[in-house]
Image (cartoon, rainbow, N blue to C red):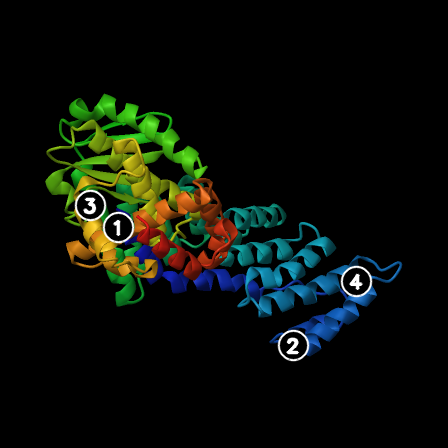
Amino acid sequence: MLRIFLAGLLSILLPTVLWAQVSLFNEYLTPETPGLASELASFVAPGQKLDAKISELRQAAGQPGAGKSAKVDLAAFILRKVALQRNLSYEENEELILEASDLLPGDYFVESLWGDLLYYKGDYETAFSHYDNALFKKPDDIQLHGRMGLAAMQQMHYEQAITHFERVLAEKPDSFFIIYSVGRCHFELKHLEEAIESWEKALKLAKDEREKKAIEAALSQARELLASTSDSTREEDQRFVIHFAGNSQEDLGDVTFEMLEEIFFQVTDSLNFQPEVKINIIFFLTEEYYKVSREWSAGSAQGIQIMVPLKSGYKSPDYVKGLLAHEFTHTIIHLKTSNRCPLWLNEGLAQYQEFNAAYGSPETIRPDYEPLMQKEFIDKRNFVNLNQVPSLIGGSSHYDIARGYIASYLAVRCMADFYGEQTFDSLLSALGRGKSLDESMNEATGKSMADFQEEFEEWLRNL
């Protein structure tokens, strides 16, 4: 199961994030030719007059003997146009930002704006590299450090993010969202006491009830998790940090590391992605686990953290192996796509890997799902539109939840049958580059989402 608590909290605080990003667009490159600065400031919206001015400046910059000032003038007006039409897609602005970069390679204003455009697109890795280029020009720019922290946090490079956020807090110690973000990074790294300390500071700075409730919810989860794991045993290897509650280390310790080694290569090879960070796995006492997760879940993944309750039956190696494969798959998908994977694909791939690990084949479904699959999908042909999966899985009916999971799994099986497992990598990679689901499906399969839905239903009729 994929938990979305902190992602939901981030959406509550999104206006603060957007304000921080947009502020850079108000800082413009200044033309070098006298009089052009005031003319540049007069443009408050893109249009024919601005385009005509850019054409005029292009001609001037292209003249033999044109100096650097002509390039700066042209780049300044190009960047203004890009900033004024930042509501357009990255692709619609890409040609202009490339032109500005050719005129002024490595320029602070070019690289900063370029990074923002890519951040909006969702390409956090490339955005970070452009922010880094800009930072080379202004190493103490706290706006850039804030953006680099956000881009690193989106990629789950939490320690790197904290380093940049701390540079901001050194000058702006009361920055609410940065303090919240530091807490989130510590939470993901399982530095729970540090997370609580940061969120307690953020709570004092919250400006409205919405922010206060979001921070209080985060604090509650962190405190419950700290209480649940305070007496746990901790072990780690080069890939995982494992927290064992009670005497679970004696029961699960050696076998867990052996399983995780096998699962690691199964999932990372299939999805063509190896994490650069260690994954935290927490084995809870059952009663403690259900304080921080839904009562019907067998396990949950949140960022780089996997949580598993200990209950009867978990000593079965195949069960544990399948469960860990499922949750580890969620973590890899989250890292590979920066949390931009639709729920049906996320849960479908997680089950595909789970069944492969537990039963030796991704085509062998969970035994308790077989009757429902036969009744709803084969006998009744009561198919599920994949767009409806979030409402099914997020509902309260166990029957509907199971239908959502089964539909997700079958959709991934259908994709593997028609296009091969290599499609998983292509699809997730496109999502990770900030492409929409339709764009990603077209790139990976040559089909739109609507076309794939039809293809999926036809495949189901032939099961």
- Whether residue 340 is visible, yes or no, is yes
Nearer to us: label 1 or label 4 = 1
Question: Circle 1 sits on which residue?
Answer: 405
| Residue contact at pointers 1 and 2, CB within 8 angstroms | no
**Crowd class of label 4 (few under 14; some 14 to 19; many from 20; radius 10 Å):** many
Vertical arrangement, residue 74 with respect to residue 227, above or below: below
Task: Tell which tag, 3 or 1, sits nearer the viewer.
Answer: 3
Residue 193 image offset from top left, x and y in percent: 26, 41
SS at circle 4: helix
Q: Position of residue 220 (x, y in %)?
A: 20, 51
Q: Of label 2 and label 3, which has the lower sequence position?
A: 2
Check disc 3 and give the amino acid type.
Answer: Tyr
Quick one: label 3 or label 1, which is nearer the N terminus? 3
> In front: 342, or 374?
374
Residue type indicated by callout 2: Gly
Q: Position of residue 254 (x, y in %)?
A: 24, 21
Residue 47 image label: 2
**Residue at which label 4 appears:** 70
What is the three-letter code of the residue carrying label 1? Tyr
Mark 1: few, some, or many residues within 10 Å (few <14, many ≥20)?
Answer: many
Dot 1 falls on a residue whose secondary structure is: helix
Say which residue label 3 marks: 369
Residue farthest toward the right in the current orientation of the protein = 64
C-alpha span from label 2 to label 3? 58 Å
Assess whether mark 1 and mark 3 are in contact (beta carbons under 8 angstroms).
yes
The foreground one among 379 and 388 is 379
